[in-house]
Image (spheres, rainbow, N blue to C red):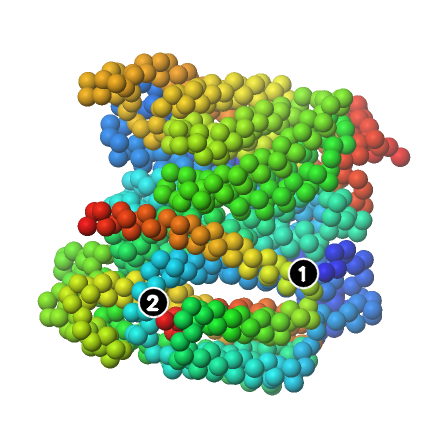
Amino acid sequence: MDHTKTPSAPNSASQADVPLAHVVELRILLTVFAALIMLTAITVAVSYFDFGAFNLSVALGVATIKATLVALYFMHLRYDNAFYATIFVIAVGFLGLFLGITMLDAVEYYPDVQTWQQSTR
Amino acid sequence: MATTQVEPVPDSYLTDPRGLRSWLVTRDHKRIGLMFLVLISASLALGAVFALLIRTELTLPGGQVVSTGAAYNRLFTLHGAVMIFLFVIPAIPSSFGNFVLPIMLGAKDVAFPRLNLASLYLYVVGMVFFLLVLLLGGIDTGWTFYPPYSTSTATPVVLAVVGAFILGFSSIFTGINFLVTIHTMRPPGMGWFRMPLFLWSLYGTAVIQVLATPVLAITLLLLAVERVLGIGIFDDKLGGDPILFQHFFWFYSHPAVYIMILPAMGIISEVISVFSRKHIFGYDFIAYSSIAIALLGFLVWGHHMFVSGQSPLVAMIFSALTFTVAIPSAIKVFNWLATMYKGSIELTPAMCFALNFIFLFGIGGLTGLFLGALATDLHVHDTAFVVAHFHYTMAGGVLMAFLAGLFYWWPKITGRMYRVGWGQLAALVVLIGFNLTYFPQFIIGARGMPRRFFDYTQLVQPDPDFPMLKPHPEFVYYQIISTVGGFLFVGGLVLVAINLIGSCFGGRKAPANPWGAATLEWQCDSPPPRENFASAPEAGDCYDYDDLEYDEQAQEYVKLP
Amino acid sequence: MTQSQEPPPAPRDGGNHDAAPLAHHFDSLKQQYDSAKLGMWVFLITEVLFFSGLFCWYAVFRANHPDVFVDGHHFLETPLGAFNTAVLIFSSLTMALAVRSAQLGRRAPLIGLLSVTLLCGLVFLGVKTAEYRQKWHHRLVPGQARIEYFFSAKRTDGVSAPPAKEFLPEGEGQAQYRQYVRQHLAHAGEEILTEEQLQGRIANLRSFMGIYFTLTGLHALHVIIGMGVIFWILVGAIRGRFGPRRFTAVDLVGLYWHLVDLIWIYLFPLLYLIH
């Protein structure tokens, strides 16, 4: 991002030329749409097969590819300032931190809960 | 609103334009900051009333103010909820932050003035919800709303939870505003590492507000949904998981203590440097440590849950990580001390409160390590030791910095000078009162005085049922000292209020730069005109005092040619 | 109003009516646009973390009670979920195209594309309503007894509210409910259920429906809010308020709508596909 303020010159012709944002090509948007629909079809089709422990990874993997496509092209992250992408990734990182540590703990303490539940039954 | 009755000063933000309506729909960051300041101070007063009731109750064993534990539960819950959600969280960012952030950047306003006004109104709505809870008899869950009790108690938990939810949005809006303003509106010549340190700390605060507060919002929403519809989320009787709530809650509420303390540290960085008349020592380290605190603050939430049933593995991880937060905090404290070293220290009221901060926050921070260590925490968990610790950090830290900021920026906000001598006296009274109140609680806490007990008769008398338990008659003396100290502490605060409000009526007119500070807000008039600066100011080194000299006649600092 | 007393902002854009009015505290249109966009992204971050609580709840339950999801997913209709996913992705495309039209200053396509996006939102909510209705019919909605009580005459007649913990209907309704669960599970291949097994299945179903309704309900709320703001910019587009240097609102609403889509992209497999 342009961190320094441009000197104030609101009426100058040069300022009117500064593009505000990138215009994404039509072809790219349509291709991304086709890819998203195809991935949806794949993930539904695949769900009828049982991959055991991989069910979750497959479903979430496809979802992540779809989400990345939406973020990069529909949300312009690929063309915009890299800072937006950075903070978005940081946010997802914090989601992972929250989810990861909480899950780690929940899985660790759950056997104690089960033992307790059985002892009170 | 006492400050609006100031004798008209031409062309200041206070009088341009006039009329109540112009205040209610204003988008001026200074007016919004000032209204926040008034509301936040009122919340502080309300919280202080509950605090005095609690102290009076605990003076002697048996009931003084309340006669049942249920009533006492409501009392400390209201004290905690009002102080946390209405005072300490918004205290500094929403009031002083709003007021000075754009001026420090030489800007006319924050990036989203309307969002800023929305933040103020959300705060008011949240306040109304809390007052409704108060009128309905209060809630008795503690400010943390832990289930399963909070899903079964008959008190109006949902109302309080919705109030906290709304206040959370007020905080998020402020955070978004500050983040964007600092990113896009810095003046020419002010790179990231030439910003005043207060802005760095507000930036760190905004990062936490944006990343953590939404998690509080969803936590409270889920709690309300569980209570109303019986969906099993946190209540084990409904198939939920109570420890999950504590993870959710502290994922917000631990970083939230840095929402409270970071802006306080920012104020101290400004005040210490100005009144030592010396360039701040280790600028880069203080700046980085603000960001480090903001990020490390997210890694330690589990240290609130050591006795909750959290697994030993995760508890150990959290305990180890907790110690790392001490590092950036200590970096700041050492840098402040180094700034004062060989400076020409001027003991203005703002400086006195800043010194109070360093002393009290030092104690509060170091006792925090006792609680972060797994083994000692098991001993002192849920005792008065914990109460003393967080009051040393929150009241001794945030409140002292709030008062330092209040004395520091008061001339800028109102355009009036207060009585310096009375301010110094107040700082001394507050310091003595504070330590009398909370230091005894470390001692009795370590000896086993639990928190949240309204009647401790059984602790001071021999218990026939448990002859092996040693009675603690000395608890009574410590509790009496604590109560006396509490009243002295609040007395000091009243002194501050009288001094400052009194200055609005007949105080000397404040010059533009009474303290000789080099940050941009002291380059515009006191109080500032509506758009802050007639022409964009030039940002120089904001801690360079060499070219400022005191002008005896004008009683202010002027720039040397 | 303070606004009325401020100096007129119009001249600062050089009299160009296609450009957005420049607020008094910004120096340039670019600065104003960048600030708005950064603000929107930061807001989207708060949305991500808001939903993180729901995902965390899901993850912990999935790790500790996988049977909840095995039993629960039999009660959802995957084709409807898949259809809704396609609808939302299509609406994301039309929204992205709408932003493009706004940037290029093409008013008629902008109006058309925004209308289609709005329509897709309606279809999505329609399908969702149909799914919810079916669950309501089989008494699978958490807190249903309380909701019914709230909308019934019992409340005014002084009958006290059913406790939040109550899940099963009383009397004949309960027998029907049990029968429904038993049949549905038998259809999915679980023939013989003892009373204890059935109790366990019902408890699981209750947990699952709690997660399902909270997650999809909050998402639907975001869809409704998104439709509200799309309607607002649609009105703006009809009035000709957007142009090549004046499309910030369309762009930001687009970002919000894509995020709502993005969240559904995760909710769909998590709720409908995993077993």
Instruction: Say whether marks 2 and 1 touch (CB < 8 Å).
Output: no
Q: Position of residue A29 (x, y in %)?
A: 62, 81
Which residue corresponds to the image point at 10% horizontal and 70% vertical from the top-left?
A: C172
Asked if residue B538 can be seen in this view, the reply is: yes
Q: Is residue B173 above or below residue B440?
A: below
Q: Position of residue B156 (x, y in %)?
A: 30, 47
Q: For the C terminus of chain B, give its image quadrant.
A: top right
Is B123 or A121 nearer to us in this picture? A121
Q: Secondary structure at mark 1?
A: helix
Q: How many marks?
A: 2
Q: Residue furthest left?
A: C171
Q: Secondary structure at mark 2?
A: helix
Answer with the quarter of the image where residue C112 lies. Answer: bottom right
Q: Residues within 10 Å of mark 1 (few under 14, many from 20)?
A: few
Residue on which the image places disc 2: C69
Is C124 or B277 nearer to us in this picture? C124
Q: Is residue B461 left or right of residue B246?
A: left
Q: The residue under label 1 is which amino acid type?
A: Phe
Q: The residue under label 2 is which amino acid type?
A: Phe
Chain of the residue that carries numbered disc 2 in the rendered image: C
Q: Residues within 10 Å of mark 2 (few under 14, many from 20)?
A: many
Q: Is residue B196 left or right of residue C235?
A: right
Q: Is residue B544 left or right of residue B436?
A: right
Q: CA distance from mark 2 to mark 1?
A: 38 Å
Which residue corresponds to the image point at 33% horizontal and 72% vertical from the top-left?
A: C73
Residue on which the image places disc 1: A83
